[in-house]
Amino acid sequence: MELHVITEENQQTDDLLRLWPGLVPWVDYFHLRFKSKSQDQVFQIAKKILSHNLIPRSSLIINRHMEVAEQLRCGGVHLPEDTADWKIDNHVVAHIRRGRSVHSLESAIRAESDGMDYIMVGHIFPSRSKPGVPPMGLKRLEKIVAAVKIPVIAVGGIGPDQVADVMGAGCAGIAVISAVYSHPSPEQAVQQLKRSGEGG
């Protein structure tokens, strides 16, 4: 099971430098997602993190900013659903993994046809980051998984108790925020999630 850990919006770089190294054995991808920061700000944060050599470069995914991922040769770029009309130069970004967030069956099919390497689908369960927005639920998730051939990563309200259900729906992995950062021990949190995804 792939485990993706996404930053909280107001997280400080020093906090990430302190937390992430201890999560490396269990986390497959670390997402830098800062909706309110400029491309240059994200570039500087990513550059600082990589300069410490505390996480594998291949595990760092930059959300939204393709140029940052390309310049720093990160492991991947993750695009919001509303970037479906962006032109992606497959030659330029061929060496990095490309993903897109989707919230419907139609968007999932389009993401696959656009050449995405994976999609992130959600939110599956009620989520603190999506207050007042109804969750997608497992049945819609299953329909999306069945409709595409690329890996599906489930996101939204997922903790250890929900992992078996989303993996049973055919997902390749999960993405989490509060399940890790709100836990008293983030290291223990990722271990629990990973074990749950592997039937432990």
Image: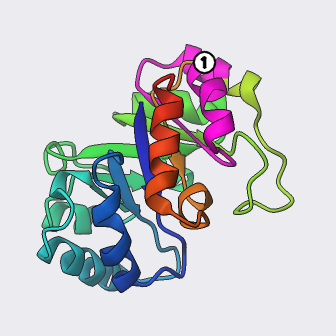
- Who is closer to the viewer here, 43 or 161? 161
Q: Quadrant of the N terminus?
A: top left
Residue 85 visible in the shown view? no
Vertical placement of residue 14 versus 185, above or below: below
Residue 58 sits inside the magenta stretch: no
Please provide the residue range marked out in magenta: 142-168
| The quadrant where residue 125 appears | top right
Q: Which residue is mark 1?
A: 168
Please state the horizontal and vertical placement of residue 99, each as a whole percent of the image: 39, 44
Label 1 neighbourhood size at 10 Å, few (<14), some (14-19), many (20+)? few
- Who is closer to the viewer here, 161 or 13? 161
Residue at the (61%, 23%) spot, across then down: 144
Please state the horizontal and vertical placement of residue 76, each as a whole percent of the image: 27, 51
Vertical placement of residue 56 versus 7, above or below: above
| The quadrant where residue 61 appears | bottom left
| The quadrant where residue 39 appears | bottom left
Q: Is residue 158 left or right of residue 41?
A: right
| Secondary structure at numbered mark 1 | helix
Residue at the (56%, 24%) spot, across then down: 167
Please state the horizontal and vertical placement of residue 51, each as a whole percent of the image: 12, 76
